[in-house]
Amino acid sequence: MSSWWRRVRPQQGGLLLSLLGFLLFSAGPAFASLPTSSDPELQLERTIRTSPFVGSSISMRDAEGSAFVPRDNSLWLADDNGRAIYEVNPFTGSLKRKISASSFESATRFGGGAVAGADRVRDFESLAYDEANDILYVFSGPCCSSSVLPTAFRLLRGGAGTLQVDSYQPLGSGANYTGAGWNSADGKTYVGVGARLRSYDFVTNTAGSIFKVPNLSGITGMDFSSGDLFVTTNAEKLRRVDWASKTLVTGWTFDLTRFQIRDSRAVDLIGDRFYVLDGYDGRPNGDPLDHAVFVFDVLP
């Protein structure tokens, strides 16, 4: 990416920035280019306010997961307490759309069956976007009552050309996928929690065998790019996993607390920048960092 492009900021570019953003991201992950350095650094480029969103009165209540959809140039964010997901422009931070709990509650089980109901939308945890098939997955967990039912929801492209809630699959009572991501290398969706990783197939509603990456634990967010897995953890670290060897990449562990991130919940690599969602609930009302998305450059 050119030095000129790095100097452009959302507040300065206006319509030109939006156009350049569309051209950049419409080509998808081919533009993702990270430095080859063995000891890179993060530099905070900006933050995206979500409480409220730019030009809106709507606010995130409890940030949990995210996924980038390059076809729409949209960053999707999951709101646990708000029981909703939001479609956001990653350049301007403006809110495009909100999909509320009612859309998920009325979804029918994949293959036919009862509607999801309220108990399947009480604990949104993570999102993953299957770019090959243009499918957005939303995973909910079991918190914080025995009546809450872990669930996988599927969103497909509707008649209006936008992603819409299509169906759901019930997950096991102990399923709590705090991280999720789609891997273009093998076409599979992976989910993670704690130190455990496994694949998940929505159509068959089956999870693969559990595996672990040595010295990786506390998984909160996941994103695949450039053949590797990027993970945020509950120790407020951003880490890179060499997917071929299932090992951590030396020099690619970043401390997020130095940027005032207190509860890293999700990560997406968009272009050559990391977007990290902070789920910390302790900031005062009106704080622009409340449930914000932190956007980072990666310096060699």
Image (cartoon, rainbow, N blue to C red):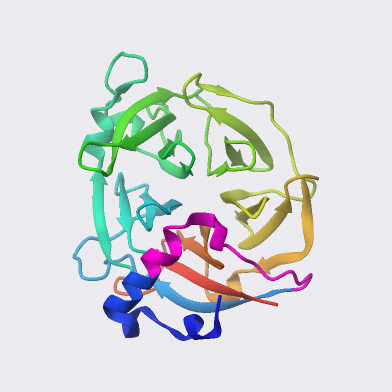
Q: Is residue 284 visible?
A: no
Q: Residue 28: say if magenta.
A: yes
Residue drawn at x 52%, y 69% is: 261
Would you place residue 115 above or below residue 268 in this image?
above
Left or right, 118 with reference to 201: left
User: Closer to the camera, 298 or 33?
Assistant: 33
Q: Which corner quadrant holds the C terminus?
A: bottom right
Question: Visible in this render: residue 253?
Answer: yes
**What is the total number of numbered labels drawn onto the structure image?**
0
Residue 220: image location, x then y, percent: 56, 50
The span picked out in magenta is: 21-39
Image quarter of residue 36: bottom right
Q: Is residue 29 left or right of residue 117?
A: right
Kindly identify the residue that appears in the image at 59 percent across and 43 percent down.
184
Residue 235, compared with residue 69, is above or below; it is below
Which quadrant of the figure contains the N terminus?
bottom right
Please state which of residues 95 and 1 is positioned toward the viewer in this rendering.
1
Q: Is residue 188 left or right of residue 196?
A: left
Task: Tell whether 20 sits left or right of 222.
Answer: left
Residue 21 rendering spot, x and y as whole percentages: 39, 68
| 52 part of magenta stretch | no
Residue occupying image coordinates x 38% and y 33%: 154
Q: Residue 278: horizontal and vertical position, in percent?
A: 47, 62
From the viewer's perspective, is residue 45 above or below residue 179?
Answer: below
Name the residue at 73% across, 34% down: 211
